[in-house]
Image: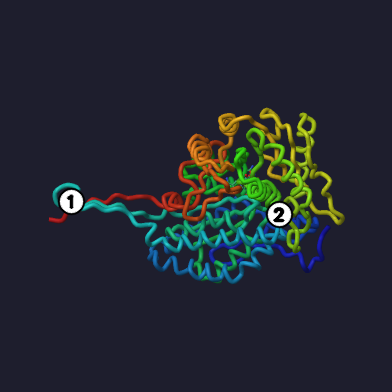
Amino acid sequence: MIATETTVRTLKFYVNGKWEAAAGSQLHPVMNPATGEVIARVPYATAEQVDRVARAAHEGFLKWRETPVVDRVQVLYRYKALLDRHADEVARILSTENGKTLEDAKGSVRRAIQMVEVACGMPTLMMGDSLENVSRGIDSQTIRQPLGVCAGITPFNFPAMVPMWMFPFAIACGNSFILKPSEKVPLTPTRTAELLDEAGIPAGVFNLIHGDKVAVDALLEHPLVRAISFVGSSPVAKYVYENAAKHGKRVQALGGAKNHLVVMPDANLEKTVEAIMGSAFGAAGERCLAGSVLVPVGGVAQPLLDLLLAKAKSMHIGDGTQPGVDMGPLVTDAHRKKVVGYIEKGVAEGATPLCDGRDAAKEGGGFFVGPTIFDNVKPQMTIAKEEIFGPVLSVIRVKSLDEAIELVNSSKFGNTTSIFTADGKSAREFASRIECGMVGVNIGVAAPMAFFPFSGWKNSFFGDLHAHGKDAIAFYTEQKVVMTRWF
Ligand code: NAD
């Protein structure tokens, strides 16, 4: 369905401090996933357009790197104030194009703003080390300098927060930045770019283009782009990692996940169920930190599942922008079909559906799948191994903590995992032996705050330095060691 022509806007690129129509680009529809309506049209950048923006970003960088860091962060202070003022508006746009509930969208915008807050501390964060008299009369110091043009390629599920894992840090360090967000959700990055423009970001320092693989490949290959930050699915993360590295770029590529929630018999059931609900079904499971495999240990399985099932069945599914809705739609119809395909596979491979989200279709369209819980899942089943990225929870019952740890560690992914227990020894052993980069203890979504790194392992991350936290400063700067002697 297409909304009236007057309400369907065609998006622009933000290049060299100006909004410009992407002449000659192909236009693609942006949908409201709750209704299936077309709400905007987004142009996809060609390689020539990427070349032009890279040159503009390079020119922007040459001036920006000379701007003292205390002046650079003034733009970010103003940006933070504008984001605070427009947070609800940004959240509403986000909820409309992505589908997640308004409350969830607001939380993610809050997290985005925290990235800006931390990047405002760059005068301290960027400091190097120094040591007097490393040899007689010789002093030594390290200084951190920006790289140049950095680019960010981001996924559909956090269109405000994930780009801000990148550009506030990159810019505060003195780099210029090109953002290529997900083509499925370009309205949120457009609005947050408008606010950065209003905050007074100098021309060329921040640039926004839209597009698909063509734009990504052009960024990976462009000689003026020095670093690539990527967040998305694992196959694309690996591709980006390999190809950016082949072209001599620094790269951090965050990938997909399959996260396990381990519940010990001594866990607080009520609070644990609440945390599992948020983890598995929050944002309709479209989170890289979503709990996807529930691992009850011993006798806790049945009482846990009874409680969980009752909660899942009482969830209100609908348009995420409306009050009282617990879970919105999936982002596109293609993604809905993919998730339904996984549910069909779970049934075909012999798992027991306790509740089946395929019944959640709504009148008037929309890409809905309801909460789905599979019992009697075996580790070799597809739904136990692959990332589904929807509201589907697979239950694998185990007998001991050792068995649970072995199961989690057998996954090819290593993004996050959680344990629910009242026993400190079990929690400590789990956190120590588990092969995942982010661990929750009685927490369903262990998302690191802006000042800690987002630390996926294994196939959930390709690279060395992670997103945000101190890693971001190391990633977006080059280190120089200066030794000084005066005669
Ligand atoms: P995606 O991999 O399809 O797309 C991510 C970005 O890559 C988009 O900007 C897209 O335009 C681009 N892209 C897609 N296919 C490409 C190709 N063949 N070549 C070059 N570029 C390509 O991911 P998505 O569906 O937008 O997002 C969901 C995925 O992101 C999930 O796998 C989720 O786990 C992951 N994710 C990971 C994290 C993390 O921190 N590890 C955070 C959020 C999302």
User: Quick one: label 2, few (<14), some, or many (20+) residues within 10 Å?
Assistant: few
Q: Residue furthest right?
A: 363
- What numbered label is drawn on residue 26? 2
Please tell me whether mark 1 sits on a helix, a strand or a loop.
strand
Question: What residue is at 20 percent from the left and 48 percent from the top?
Answer: 134
The mark tally for this picture is 2
Within the image, what quadrant is residue 355 found in? top right
Q: Point out residue 79 in the picture as x, y percentages from the top left corner.
A: 52, 68
Residue 78 versus residue 431: which sits nearer the camera? 431
Within the image, what quadrant is residue 256 found in? top right
Please tell me whether mark 2 sits on a helix, a strand or a loop.
strand
Give the Cα distance between marks 2 and 1: 61 Å
Q: Amino acid at mark 1?
A: Asn
Placement of 438 over or under 23, stated as above or below: above
Determine which residue is flagged by label 1. 133
Question: What residue is at 72 percent from the left and 41 percent from the top?
Answer: 305
- What numbered label is drawn on residue 430? none
Question: What residue is at 55 percent from the left and 60 percent from the top?
Answer: 207
Question: What residue is at 34 percent from the left and 57 percent from the top?
Answer: 127
Q: Amino acid at mark 2?
A: Gln
Within the image, what quadrant is residue 41 found in? bottom right
Q: Point out residue 183 in the picture as x, y percentages from the top left corner.
A: 67, 53
Does the Cβ of the disc 1 residue fall within 8 Å of ligand 1?
no
Q: Point out residue 75 in the picture as x, y percentages from the top left corner.
A: 48, 68
User: Quadrant location of the C terminus?
Assistant: bottom left
